[in-house]
Image: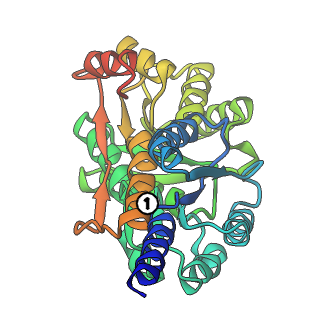
Amino acid sequence: MKFGKFLMTTAALAFSATTAFAGADIFVIGGKPDDPFWSRVKMGAEDAGKVAEAQGGSVTWLGPQNYDNLGPDAAELIRQAIDQGADAIVGPDWVPEAMDPAFEAVVAAGIPLVIYNAGGIEAADRLGAMNYVGAVDYKSGHAAGVYLAKAGNKNGACVNTLPGAANIEAFCNGFNDGLVAGGGTGSTLQLPATSFGDSTAVAQAVRAHVLQNPEIDAMFAIGDQDTNAAISGIQQAGKAGSVAVCGMNFNDSILANIKAGTQACAIDQQGYQQGFFAVSILNNHVMYGTTIPTREILTGPGVVDASNVDLVIAGVEAGAR
């Protein structure tokens, strides 16, 4: 009798250990993998996912083919993650009116959720997510506006190539408010979503805009490609040196721009850390029940300019940025 109980107990413990330590299958909703910023976020998520894989789990990246129908497409990806049996989900709240119902379905299904990159702690609280990882979009734009205003620029325009995306609208609102706080004025150059990442379209629009509005002496772009395109448009308009440029995120060409003096600054939100931290938090939660008491893990904003660009370049070369 005792031996039988021992066998049953041993079997129960073995089953319990197997189920308790089965790997976590984590789904990450993000941008296009060929988007320079999102490729870094994806790398961070996948690097954190190596721990999940070693434990028998996985990290699956789901991104849209393009940004033409961003909110509904992203909502569909969230629902795909649910249908595919996700143990945990990471996602940005880009377009709340389209995406929130899908996130609510995640929470209703009892699937742990972390909001990252867009939406802030407000979205995490509203949706019942565990945490928010990322920068505060408004503050990122605001930092750029304040920086350029302090440098003496008084009339700026934010180039918005993803109208309707809440995080991009927040970038532009923050930028314009930052200029106003420094005694300047701000406006937004709205372009269709099809222009995002289309360097020719953005450059042509910027060229036309600065020629039609000669009072503009500062521009802010929402990503690497758009920043380079804005610089090209300014140069084509013959305004190089008279219109300062700042942009979100950076890559090798952006750092080269800053070092050469053709770009004033870049706002760093540390995309790699966003992916890495979000996946790590959820993997540990699913595996061991851990939680992070700090419910807003900020990865930015940071300003990269001529004063620190060499250090940032060294970090990139070392694989740390």
Counting from the top left corner in percent of width and height, residue 74 is at 68, 63
User: Residue 111 location in percent, x, y?
Assistant: 54, 75
Along the line of sight, which residue is nearer the eye, 78 or 305? 78
229 vs 140, left or right, is right
Q: Is the image coloured rainbow, by chain, by secondary structure, or in one colour?
A: rainbow
Task: Give neighbour class at mark 1: few <14, some 14-19, many 20+ (Cα, 10 Å).
Answer: many
Q: Give the image location of residue 165, x and y in percent.
A: 59, 62
Residue 128 horizontal side relative to residue 238, left or right: left
Asked if residue 195 is positioned above or below residue 292 in the image, the reply reads: above
> In x, y percent, where is residue 192?
72, 52
Placement of the N terminus among the 4 image quadrants: bottom left
Residue at 36%, 54% (x, y): give it: 135
For the point 38% across and 15% down, the residue is 317
User: Residue at left 37%, top 39%?
Assistant: 267
Which residue is depicted at the point 30% across and 64% down?
A: 296
Q: Based on the displayed image, in which of its 4 quarters is residue 36 positioned?
A: top right
Indicate the quadrant containing the C terminus: top left, top right, bottom left or bottom right.
top left
Closer-to-camera residue (221/153): 221
Q: Is residue 109 visible?
A: yes
Disc 1 residue type (three-letter): Asn
What SS does tag 1 mark?
helix
Check the image and report above or below for 74 versus 140: below
For disc 1, the marked residue is 173
- Figure quadrant of residue 308: top left
Asked whether residue 176 appears in the rendered view, the answer is no
Quadrant of the rendered structure where residue 231 is?
top right
